[in-house]
Image (spheres, helix red, strand yellow):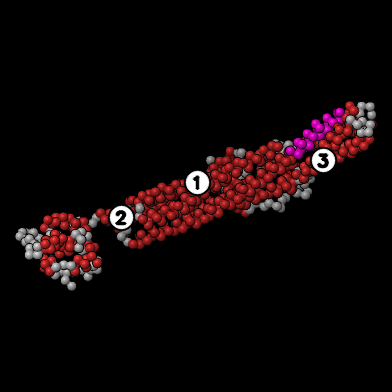
C-alpha cells in the first residue's frame, strides 16, 4: 500500500525545531515524537518554556550588577558627569535601544499577523470539515430512517392488500430483501458523529485561545511603542517622576517579553513535533471510532487506496434501483386490480427517489478529495504560517527583552546624571558675589542704607531746592555702584538687569525701559548717582 504523499511537505523550520533537545524535569532526554498525553513529553515542553525564565534571571542579574556598579562608583561617576561625552553616550544608547525596540515591534506585528492567519486557516478548515461530516451523518441517518421505517410500513400494508395474489407477494418479499440489504450496508458505515463533535470542539477552542493570544501580543507591542515615546519625553524634560514611571513599565514589559519568548518557543517546538509527522498522531487519536483503512484513505487520498465505502454505497444504490423497478411494475399491473394499493406504492416510490438522491450526495461527500483538501489547508495554516509567525514572535520577544534591559541601564545612568547635576547646584558657594542668592542676602543687610531713587525723584519733583539727606556715618560702606544701578532700573537685584558699568565688563545691551529711564534723568539725579550713566 503506497502511502507517499506529494501534496504536503513539512517546512525546513519545523524539522529544525523538531530537532531541539527535549528534556524532562530530571534533565533526561525525551523522544521528540508528538505525544501530548504523555507526562514526559509535557515536561519537555515545560522545560522549553522555562527558557524565558532563564533569560529573565540573566537580565535581572546583569541589571543588578550594573546598578551596584553605579552605586559603588558614585564618586568616579560624578567626576565623569562633568564631561559632555558621558551625556552624549547615554543619549545615543537610549536612541539605539529605542530603534531596536521599534524594529522588534515591526517584527512582532508581522509575526502576530502571520500566526493569526495560520490559526484562522486552521479553524476555517476544521469548521468546513465539520460541516462535511455533519452533512454525511445527516444524509446517512436520513436514508437509513426513510428505508427502515417508511418503506417497511408501506410494505406491511401492501402485504395485507395483496394477500390473495402470490405473484405480488413474491415481489414484496423481494423488495423486503432489498430493504434489508440497504439497512445492513448503511449500518456498516463508520460512525463519524464522534469525529464531528471533536472537530467542532477543537475549532472553538483554537479560535478562543487565538483571540486572547492575538490581543495580548497586540497590547504588548503597543506598550513597547509607548515606552519608547515616553523615554524620549522623559529624557527631554529631565523629569524624575516620568523616568520612574518609565522604569516601572519597562520592567513590566521586560517580564512579559521573556514570558512571551518562553511561550512562543514551547508552542513552536510542540507544533513542529506535530507537523513533522501529523498522520501518525491523527491515526492514533481516531482509532477508537475509525478503522485504519478509513483514516489512511482520507489522510493520504491516494489513487492506489481503495474507497472503503464504495462497496456499501454500490450495494445500496443497486438495491434502491431494483426496488424502484419493482414498484414501477406493481403500479402498472396491480393498481387496476387493487386500487387501494396505489397510495402505498406511490409513498414507497417517493421514499426511494429521496433515498437515491441522498445516496448520490453521500457518495460525493464520502469521496476523499473534499476532506483531504481541508486537512491539507489546516496543515498549511498551522505548519507554515502558524509556526513561522511564532518564530517571528520569538525573535521580537528576544530583541525587545535585550533592548529593554539596555534601556533600563540607560535610564539608571540618566538618573545618576540628574542627581549629579542637582548636587552641583547644591554645592554653589554662598559667598560667591556672582551667586544671585548671595547678592540678595547682601542687599537685605544694606537695604536700610540704600536710598530709593523713586522716592528721591518724587522729592526732587516737589521740592527742587532740597538735597538728599547726608550720610553722616563714616563706618557705613557706600552701596555698590551696581546695586544703585539695580535699584534704578526696576528695584530688583537680578543680575541680568544690572548694567555692568565700572567692573571691566563688556558693554551691556540696554532694554528700552532702561534707556527711557536714563534719558529722563535730571541734572540733580546725575550729580547724585555720578557719571556712570553718561554716554
Q: Is residue 235 left or right of residue 126?
A: left
User: Total number of numbered labels?
Assistant: 3
> For the residues marked 3 and 1, what is the alpha-carbon distance in whole angstroms?
58 Å
Disc ID at residue 239: none
Q: For numbered disc 3, what is the local secondary structure? A: helix
Compared with 246, 434 (above or below) is below
Which mark identifies residue 259? 1
Q: Nearer the viewer, residue 157 or 476?
A: 157
User: Would you say residue 387 is visible in this rendering?
Assistant: no
User: Is the residue marked by circle 3 packed among few (<14), some (14-19), or many (20+) residues within 10 Å?
Assistant: many
Location of residue 30 in the rendering, given as x and y in whole percent from the top left corner: 59, 43
x, y (%) of residue 308? 78, 42
- What separation in Å lies between label 3 and label 2 (alpha carbons)? 92 Å
Q: Residue at x 65, y 40 (%)?
A: 200
Task: Judge left or right: residue 180 versus residue 38.
Answer: right
Say whether residue 188 is left or right of residue 67: right
Label disc, if present, on residue 356 of the rendered structure = 3
For the stretch drawn in magenta, the main secondary structure is helix
Residue at the (73%, 41%) spot, across then down? 135
Image vertical order of residue 510 relative to residue 231, above or below: below
Asked if the residue under mark 1 is in contact with the one under mark 2, i.e. CB atoms within 8 Å, the reply is: no
Pointers 3 and 2 in contact (C-beta within 8 Å): no
Would residue 27 appear left or right of 131 to someone viewing this image? Answer: left
Q: Earlier in the sequence, mark 3 or mark 2?
A: 3
Q: Is residue 159 magenta?
A: no
Which of the numbered marks, if any, corresponds to residue 420?
Answer: 2
The residue mark sitting in front, 3 or 2, is 3
Work out whether residue 207 can be spotted.
yes
- Mark 1 is surrounded, within 10 Å at the Cα level, by few (under 14), some (14 to 19) or many (20 or more) other residues, namely many
Give the mark, 3 or 1, whose residue is nearer the N terminus.
1
Magenta residues (range): 138-157
Amino acid at each position: 500500500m503506497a502511502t507517499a504523499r506529494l501534496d504536503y511537505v513539512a517546512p525546513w523550520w519545523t524539522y529544525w525545531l523538531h530537532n531541539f533537545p527535549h528534556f524532562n524535569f530530571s534533565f533526561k532526554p525525551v523522544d521528540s515524537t508528538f505525544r501530548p498525553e504523555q507526562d514526559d513529553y509535557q515536561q519537555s515542553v515545560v522545560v522549553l518554556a522555562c527558557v524565558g525564565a532563564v533569560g529573565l534571571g540573566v537580565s535581572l542579574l546583569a541589571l543588578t550588577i550594573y546598578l551596584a556598579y553605579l552605586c559603588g562608583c558614585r564618586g568616579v561617576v560624578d567626576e565623569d558627569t562633568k564631561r559632555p561625552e558621558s551625556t552624549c553616550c547615554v543619549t545615543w544608547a537610549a536612541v539605539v535601544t529605542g530603534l531596536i525596540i521599534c524594529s522588534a515591534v515591526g517584527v512582532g506585528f508581522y509575526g502576530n499577523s502571520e500566526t493569526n492567519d495560520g490559526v484562522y486557516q486552521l479553524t476555517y478548515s476544521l469548521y468546513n470539515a465539520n460541516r462535511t461530516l455533519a452533512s454525511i451523518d445527516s444524509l446517512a441517518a436520513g436514508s437509513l430512517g426513510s428505508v427502515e421505517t417508511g418503506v417497511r410500513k408501506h410494505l406491511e400494508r401492501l402485504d395485507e392488500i395483496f394477500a390473495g395474489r402470490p405473484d405480488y407477494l413474491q415481489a414484496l418479499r423481494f423488495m423486503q430483501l432489498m430493504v434489508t440489504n440497504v439497512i445492513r450496508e448503511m449500518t456498516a458505515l463508520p460512525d463519524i458523529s464522534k469525529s464531528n463533535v471533536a472537530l467542532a470542539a477543537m475549532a472553538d477552542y483554537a479560535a478562543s485561545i487565538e483571540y486572547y493570544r492575538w490581543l495580548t501580543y497586540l497590547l504588548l507591542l503597543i506598550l513597547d511603542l509607548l515606552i519608547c515615546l515616553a523615554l524620549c519625553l522623559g529624557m527631554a524634560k529631565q523629569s524624575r517622576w516620568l523616568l520612574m514611571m518609565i522604569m516601572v513599565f519597562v520592567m513590566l514589559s521586560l517580564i512579559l517579553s521573556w514570558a512571551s519568548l518562553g511561550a512562543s518557543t514551547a508552542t513552536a517546538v510542540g507544533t513542529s513535533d506535530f507537523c513533522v509527522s501529523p498522520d501518525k498522531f491523527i491515526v492514533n487519536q481516531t482509532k477508537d471510532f475509525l478503522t485504519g483503512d478509513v483514516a489512511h484513505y482520507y489522510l493520504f487520498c491516494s489513487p492506489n487506496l481503495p474507497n472503503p465505502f464504495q462497496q456499501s454505497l454500490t450495494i445500496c444504490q443497486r438495491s434502491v434501483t431494483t426496488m424502484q423497478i419493482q414498484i414501477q411494475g406493481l403500479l402498472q399491473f396491480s393498481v387496476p386490480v387493487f386500487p387501494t394499493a396505489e397510495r402505498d406504492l406511490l409513498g414507497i416510490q417517493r421514499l426511494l427517489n429521496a433515498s437515491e438522491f441522498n445516496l448520490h450526495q453521500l457518495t460525493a461527500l464520502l469521496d476523499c478529495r473534499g476532506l483531504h483538501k481541508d486537512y491539507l489547508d489546516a496543515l498549511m495554516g498551522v505548519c507554515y504560517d502558524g509556526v513561522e509567525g511564532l518564530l517571528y514572535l520569538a525573535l521580537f520577544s528576544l530583541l525587545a527583552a535585550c533592548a529593554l534591559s539596555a534601556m533600563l541601564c540607560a535610564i539608571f545612568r540618566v538618573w545618576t546624571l540628574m542627581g549629579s547635576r542637582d548636587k552641583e547646584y547644591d554645592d554653589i558657594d554662598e559667598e560667591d558675589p556672582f551667586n544671585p542668592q548671595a547678592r540678595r542676602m547682601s542687599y537685605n543687610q544694606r537695604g536700610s542704607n540704600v536710598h530709593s531713587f523713586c522716592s528721591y525723584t518724587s522729592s526732587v519733583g516737589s521740592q527742587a531746592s532740597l538735597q538728599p539727606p547726608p550720610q553722616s556715618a563714616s563706618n557705613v560702606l557706600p552701596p555698590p555702584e551696581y546695586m544703585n544701578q539695580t535699584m534704578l532700573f526696576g528695584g530688583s537685584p537680578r543680575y541680568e538687569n544690572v548694567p555692568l558699568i565700572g567692573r571691566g565688563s563688556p558693554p551691556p545691551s540696554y532694554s528700552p525701559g532702561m534707556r527711557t529711564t536714563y534719558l529722563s534723568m535730571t541734572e540733580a539725579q546725575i550729580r547724585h548717582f555720578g557719571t556712570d550713566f553718561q554716554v
